[in-house]
């Protein structure tokens, strides 16, 4: 097993991750197409009541891409910190 498994997973798919992010950004800014999800929404006009409808995605693009590629962002950040700390020692 590798010392930095999440970093290695990301390295293997980094080009795809970049392409997906660029595509979604392109959809947002050029086509005005945004990621939405169906969920329960609080009714601000009639407090205490809710309704179902489309809302902005609750997860960021980065969270969704990492989830798609089965990369744990918390572990990835921890591995990066360990690498950074080891560089500072040298």
Image (spheres, rainbow, N blue to C red):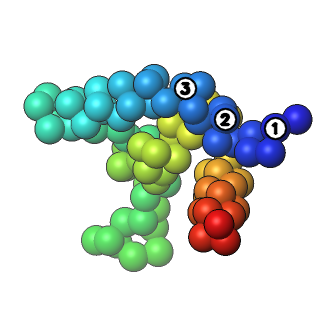
| Percent position of residue 20, x then y | 39, 27
Distance from the alpha carbon under mark 1 to that under mark 2: 8 Å
Residue 6 visible to an observer of this rendering? yes
What label does residue 13 carry, if any? 3
Residue 68 visible to an observer of this rendering? no
> Which residue is pictured at 68% across the width and 47% down the height?
72
- 83 up-or-down from 23: above or below: below
Quadrant location of residue 33? top left
Q: Are marks 1 and 2 in contact (CB under 8 Å)?
A: yes
Q: Secondary structure at mark 3?
A: helix
Q: Are marks 1 and 3 in contact (CB under 8 Å)?
A: no
Residue at the far bottom: name it.
47
- 90 up-or-down from 66: above or below: below
Residue hosting label 1: 2
| Percent position of residue 61, x then y | 42, 43
- 48 up-or-down from 4: above or below: below
| Percent position of residue 8, x then y | 66, 35
Residue hosting label 2: 8
Nearer to us: label 1 or label 3: 1
> Which residue is pictured at 45% across the width and 23% down the height?
16
- Other-residue count near label 2 (Cα within 10 Å), few / some / many at <14 / 14–19 / ≥20: some
Looking at the figure, which quarter contains the C terminus? bottom right
Whichever of callouts 1 and 2 sits on the residue coming sooner in the sequence is 1
What label does residue 15 carry, if any? none
Distance from the alpha carbon under mark 2 to that under mark 3: 9 Å
């Amino acid at each position: 097993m590798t010392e930095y498994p999440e970093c290695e997973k990301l390295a293997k798919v980094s080009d795809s991750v970049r392409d997906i992010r660029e595509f979604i950004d392109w959809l947002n800014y050029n086509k005005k197409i945004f990621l939405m999800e169906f969920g329960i929404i609080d009714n601000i006009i009639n407090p205490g009541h809710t309704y179902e409808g489309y809302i902005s995605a609750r997860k960021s693009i980065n969270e969704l891409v990492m989830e798609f590629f089965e990369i744990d962002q918390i572990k990835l950040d921890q591995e990066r910190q360990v690498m950074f700390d080891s560089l500072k020692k040298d």
